[in-house]
Image (spheres, helix red, strand yellow):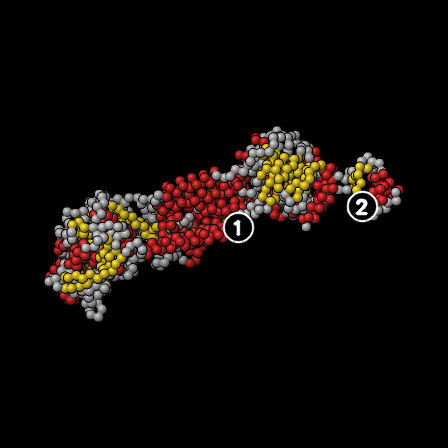
């Protein structure tokens, strides 16, 4: 070890070379997360899903529209890449994407606590709010990437397996112009991103609350399932509109010939509102928390 | 606590569900109801005595209120209107529901809303209302009263308004203008006399009352009339006259009260044209026409919208509200599936004025096709199918008519229909009203053997780009035509998308109608473009977004600001003056955990520069808690910690001068040792690093490239200490640093630390091992149960420089010898011997003197006060 001359005190008593604004740079946090195996497994699962679905359609044959019990999107799923993408989103939005988002956002702080590396980051010191911010940005980016990767891969799979065809609107004989259909797909992906915010925020709040990554991820997914169950209680009437998952399929409005925004606006507003409050709670909790892990 | 919270949430849920159930059932304890039988006299000669089963719903508000008579549909009873009556009573109306004569518990026969019977009954119900103390009167004997009802009940609403001037407003729904035209429709406009018998509906209508007798509760004259007509399939003048007498068409122009006409778009019994003609028959009063999704064939009943419209109508015209102008025509349109409820969303388009079935403007759309031949099958069978009367009532078709009437069955048999298509539309066409086309029908010579004129059924299909044809609505208009005529197609509101074709089809048969049994072939051609009524004035106001769409984000923002801003600031100012050169100063530090455990209790000590300070104490003494507070990980309840004069808070910059290793290593298990250190250093927001030097301390060799999860406990320990020393911190804090190290490594580590302190740094080592502290540290702080027990230089506290313990059985003799000896500060008994504090003498001299004095010296050991104290502490602990 070199003989360090006593360095002059840095900003507000810190080390001269210390700069709070340079702690835990996004790039570093991204590397920390991206080199984890669970990140790669999550993405592999998500990217495989469209291929599995396509294989299922190839093996089981295209669904027929004659069965009145078949949901609309299934009957036209194999029409072409666009329909296949919509169908893939439809089957993954309810659970798979929720799990993926909960994984990235729920695991991020709790796993550091579990590894005990959290205390060394905090003592480095990475200011607590900054730590949350950097972690949230990276976790949300990964979650967004996960949400986007599914339709993107579904589009590739769809083109490869079913070819390109105009988007057929389920339940009608209408086909959408390609430009319209693509813009609708962007709307759908955008809406899905916003609607998953509430899941992300919930998982993040649990992540700063518990030291167990499994607890944070499982807790968030569990609460989403609970919300789905309550949503099935139609006797609750209008109160269901305030359940965080009530609008999770509002994006199917974008598959109608006439784009209906109301459901999506409500869903986005609700998701964002919940997310803001949950994140505020997370910040409050983490700032006040005694880190004993 | 968490369980209690869950229970509370569940409780709220149960209460909520209960309240909602109560609200949906529609029973309301505030609404008082009385059931009574009201005796009426009717009949052409006013000699029929009948009692009607009625229920009166008192208004919830005190004082006299306007009254509403709620009539039921065909085959129903007063109980059908109970929920609507409840809600009107809550809204401040006195409501009377009754079972019409021939229905429910009322007496008499079914008379089809005849002016001689049912209308007279209603007049007497109005009389009854005029005597109720709850009902507001316009003048004595004339209550303020409105009448509403569906179908049969809608018919009586219109009829009684024509016959009783005391009725102030009506809201008839899905009802008829002319029963004869409804049962014998004719698309060429020649009236019921030329009409085609709507046999399926008529059969359902007239035989639904059948029980022990074929006629059931029908007035015998009506029953025999039906049987005659049904047998031949042709209307008799008498039948037409009787049906018309029960129809608003017989009193056209005599209805002069505000009328809300609600007609169903899914209705093959009383299609939209019946409401259209009612609208034209009402004079001198406001009329509003509403086309909703439901009707006799099923579809979305839109119950809450319809009942809301009715209540609003009565609010306007019975309570004297201000009617909203510019709202004369409303069409509800299905806008696809609501993704969250999986139900069809329905929006309402409104226009100021009702333009009639011919539309505000008309578009002409050319139809292709020349002359086509239509074969009428022998016996009129098999028939093509458009709608299935009655099935809708059972809800069977409601699913099929889900998407704007698209999808599902719609069967035209090959050879039995002629179709005429438009070109694909280059823009969407919204048909609102009844399209018309000029049609020529001829029967070629050889086939002209029947006595019947050609019978055809006109309908409209929507043909998609893929060629798939779906009925625009499951409606047909029949025509008897031999020659050329302007044919009116079914009235509807339907949107043809761009790229689709409009198809007009004429089929020889329809399941709902009588058609000739004799085989025939007709030549059908269209002689004009299709004239499509459109109403551009119809506007769908964007569905109003609820308040919370704007309110919730605002509330959320405010809430989150409050949540973040109201954090209790724990950093208390206090303590003495900041001395920037003192590496560590702890004063009055206290920490009590949430479970009440007092981990650190009023701890104060100081560590100076260049010291290697040992924090010594048994497990649970509060060492780790102190170190966690030192790192800003947990908040002290009282007191403060200053590092180089700066108070420690979470994330305080001065922590950057602190290197720490507390309570075990914390690494990312999937990264190698080197990557862990590199990423940690990059995360620390600092410049230069000393990773190579640190790795040398860790001494991991090639293992630095392996993931940390493969490391042994000792390897992680060394890596963690290396991490703590990465930035050559001015203050190094190590918690049990030698755990898991083998003796040579311990010795090496000790040397590193001593050298480090010699460079002018400060090192704090916490340990529960006395030897470790003694061997490494210059200073020591002893803690027990959160309190400071002793603090000072190790030499001073350990004290073995000046004190020895003489192990001897002869304590008294030894004391005697020692008191005489020079250079002894003090001598005292000390089990199992004598404790001697030397001052000036030397242990060797003391031992020599004792031996010379004949004292049996069994052993001589240095006295270690620290160990003594420490052992006592541990002893207490165990």
Residue B225 visible (yes or no): no
Q: At x 37% / y 53%, what residue is drawn?
A: A236
- Residue furthest to the bottom in view is B212
Do the residues marked 2 and 1 share a common chain? no
Residue receiving disc 2: B833
Residue at the disc numbered 1: A214
Q: Is residue B50 left or right of residue A112?
A: left
Position of B502 with respect to B696 (left or right) is: left
Expressed as whole percent of the image width and height from the top left, the position of residue B280 reads: 16, 50
Instruction: Please name the residue shown 58% across and 36% down the image.
Output: B648
Residue drawn at x 57%, y 40% is B637
In the rendered structure, the answer to whether residue A100 lies left or right of residue B550 reads right
B4 and A174: which is toward the camera? B4
Which chain is mark 2 on? B
User: Which quadrant is the N terminus of chain A positioned in?
Assistant: top right
Residue B482 pos. (x, y %): 13, 58
Above-or-below relation of B605 to B533: above
Q: Residue farthest to the top?
A: A8
Q: Which corner quadrant of the image does residue B17 belong to?
A: bottom left
- Against B436, is A138 above or below? above
Q: Quadrant of the C terminus of chain A?
A: top right
Q: Secondary structure at mark 1?
A: helix
Along the line of sight, which residue is nearer the eye, B310 or A69? B310
């Amino acid at each position: 070890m070199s003989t360090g001359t006593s360095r002059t005190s840095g900003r507000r008593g810190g080390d001269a070379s210390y700069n709070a604004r340079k702690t835990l740079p996004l790039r570093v946090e991204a590397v920390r997360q991206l080199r984890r195996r669970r990140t790669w497994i999550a993405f592999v699962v998500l990217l495989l899903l469209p291929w599995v679905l396509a294989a299922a359609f190839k093996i089981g044959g295209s669904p027929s529209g004659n069965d009145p019990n078949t949901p609309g999107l299934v009957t036209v799923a194999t029409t072409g890449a666009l329909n296949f993408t919509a169908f893939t989103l439809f089957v993954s939005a309810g659970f798979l994407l929720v799990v993926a988002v909960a994984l990235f956002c729920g695991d991020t702080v709790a796993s550091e606590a579990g590894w005990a590396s959290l205390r060394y980051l905090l003592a480095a010191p990475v200011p607590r709010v900054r730590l949350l911010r950097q972690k949230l940005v990276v976790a949300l980016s990964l979650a967004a990437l996960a949400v986007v990767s599914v339709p993107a891969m579904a589009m590739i799979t769809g083109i490869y397996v079913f070819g390109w065809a105009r988007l057929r609107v389920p339940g009608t004989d209408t086909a959408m112009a390609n430009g319209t259909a693509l813009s609708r797909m962007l709307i759908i992906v955008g809406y899905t991103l916003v609607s998953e915010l509430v899941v992300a925020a919930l998982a993040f709040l649990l992540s700063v609350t518990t030291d167990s990554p499994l607890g944070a991820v499982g807790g968030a997914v569990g609460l989403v399932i609970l919300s789905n169950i309550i949503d099935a209680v139609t006797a609750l009437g209008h109160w269901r509109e305030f359940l965080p998952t009530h609008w999770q399929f509002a994006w199917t409005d974008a598959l109608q010939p006439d784009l209906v925004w109301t459901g999506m606006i409500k869903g986005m507003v609700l998701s964002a509102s919940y997310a803001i409050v949950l994140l505020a709670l997370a910040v409050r909790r983490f700032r006040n928390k005694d880190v004993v892990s | 606590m968490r369980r209690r919270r869950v229970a509370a949430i569940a409780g709220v849920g149960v209460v909520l569900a209960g309240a909602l159930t109560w609200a949906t059932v529609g029973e309301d304890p505030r609404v008082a109801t009385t059931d009574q039988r009201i005796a009426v006299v009717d009949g052409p000669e006013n000699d029929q005595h009948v009692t009607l089963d009625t229920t009166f719903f008192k208004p919830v508000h005190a004082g006299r209120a306007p009254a509403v008579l709620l009539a039921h549909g065909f085959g129903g009873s007063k109980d059908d209107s109970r929920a609507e009556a409840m809600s009107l009573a809550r809204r401040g109306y006195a409501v009377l529901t009754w079972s019409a004569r021939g229905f429910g518990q009322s007496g008499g026969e079914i008379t089809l809303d005849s002016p001689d019977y049912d209308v007279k009954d209603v007049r007497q119900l109005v009389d009854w209302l005029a005597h109720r103390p709850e009902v507001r009167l316009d003048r004595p004997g004339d209550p303020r009263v409105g009448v509403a009802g569906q179908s049969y009940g809608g018919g009586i609403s219109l009829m009684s308004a024509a016959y009783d001037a005391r009725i102030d407003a009506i809201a008839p729904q899905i009802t008829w203008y002319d029963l004869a035209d409804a049962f014998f429709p004719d698309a060429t406009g020649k009236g019921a006399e030329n009409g085609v018998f709507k046999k399926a509906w008529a059969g359902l209508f007239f035989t639904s009352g059948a029980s022990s007798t074929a006629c059931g509760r029908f007035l015998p004259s009506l029953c025999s009339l039906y049987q005659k007509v049904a047998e031949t399939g042709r209307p008799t003048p008498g039948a037409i006259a009787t049906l018309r007498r029960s129809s608003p068409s017989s009193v056209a122009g005599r209805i002069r009260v505000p009328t809300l006409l609600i007609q169903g778009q899914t209705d093959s019994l009383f299609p939209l044209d019946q409401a259209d003609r009612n609208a034209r028959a009402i004079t001198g009063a406001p009329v509003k026409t509403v086309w909703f999704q439901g009707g006799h064939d099923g579809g979305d009943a839109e119950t809450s919208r319809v009942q809301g419209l009715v209540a609003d109508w009565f609010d306007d015209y019975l309570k004297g509200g201000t009617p909203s102008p510019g709202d004369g025509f409303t069409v509800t349109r299905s806008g696809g599936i609501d993704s969250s409820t999986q139900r069809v969303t329905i929006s309402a388009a409104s226009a100021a004025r009702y333009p009639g079935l011919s539309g505000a403007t008309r578009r002409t759309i050319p139809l292709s096709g020349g002359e086509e031949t239509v074969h009428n099958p022998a016996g009129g069978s098999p028939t093509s199918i458009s709608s299935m009367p009655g099935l809708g009532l059972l809800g069977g078709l409601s699913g099929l008519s889900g998407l704007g009437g698209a999808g599902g069955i719609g069967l035209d048999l090959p050879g039995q229909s002629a179709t005429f298509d438009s070109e694909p539309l280059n823009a969407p066409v919204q048909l609102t009203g009844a399209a018309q086309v000029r049609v020529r029908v001829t029967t070629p010579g050889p086939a002209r053997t029947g006595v019947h004129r050609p019978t055809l059924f006109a309908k409209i299909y929507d043909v998609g780009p893929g060629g798939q044809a779906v009925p625009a609505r499951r409606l047909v208009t029949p025509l008897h035509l031999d020659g050329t005529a302007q044919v009116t197609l079914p009235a509807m509101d339907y949107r043809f998308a761009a790229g689709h074709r409009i198809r007009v089809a004429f089929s020889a048969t329809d399941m709902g109608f009588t058609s000739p049994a004799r085989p025939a072939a007709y030549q059908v051609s269209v002689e004009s473009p299709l004239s499509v009524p459109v109403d551009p004035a119809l506007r769908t106001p964007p569905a109003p977004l609820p308040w919370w769409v704007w309110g919730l984000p605002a509330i959320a923002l405010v809430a989150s600001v409050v949540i973040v801003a109201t954090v209790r600031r724990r950093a208390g100012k206090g303590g003495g003056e900041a001395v920037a050169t003192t590496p560590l100063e702890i004063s009055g530090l206290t920490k009590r955990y949430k479970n009440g455990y007092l981990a650190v209790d009023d701890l104060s000590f100081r560590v100076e520069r260049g010291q290697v300070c040992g924090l010594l104490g048994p497990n649970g003494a509060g060492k780790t808690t102190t170190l966690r507070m030192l790192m800003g990980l947990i908040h002290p309840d009282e007191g403060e910690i200053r590092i180089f004069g700066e108070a420690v808070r979470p994330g305080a910059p001065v922590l950057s001068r602190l290197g720490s290793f507390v309570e075990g290593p914390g690494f990312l298990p999937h990264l190698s040792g080197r990557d862990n250190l590199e990423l940690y250093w990059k995360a620390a927001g600092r410049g230069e690093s000393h990773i190579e030097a640190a790795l040398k301390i860790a001494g991991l060799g090639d293992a630095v490239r392996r993931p940390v999860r493969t490391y042994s406990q000792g390897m992680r320990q060394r890596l963690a200490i290396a991490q703590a020393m990465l930035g050559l911190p001015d203050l190094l804090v190590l918690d049990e640093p030698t755990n898991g190290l083998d003796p040579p490594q311990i010795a090496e580590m000790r040397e590193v630390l001593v050298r480090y302190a010699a460079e002018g740094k400060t090192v704090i080592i916490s340990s529960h091992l006395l030897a470790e502290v003694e061997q490494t540290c210059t200073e020591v702080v002893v803690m027990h149960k959160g309190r400071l027990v002793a603090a000072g230089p190790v030499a001073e506290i350990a004290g073995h420089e000046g004190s020895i313990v003489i192990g001897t059985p002869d304590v008294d003799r030894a004391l005697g010898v020692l008191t005489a000896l020079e250079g002894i500060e003090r001598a005292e008994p000390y089990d199992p011997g004598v404790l001697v504090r030397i001052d000036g003498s030397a242990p060797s001299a003391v031992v020599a003197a004792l031996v010379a004095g004949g004292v049996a010296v069994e052993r001589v050991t240095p006295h270690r006060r620290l160990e003594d104290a420490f052992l006592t502490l541990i002893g207490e602990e165990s």
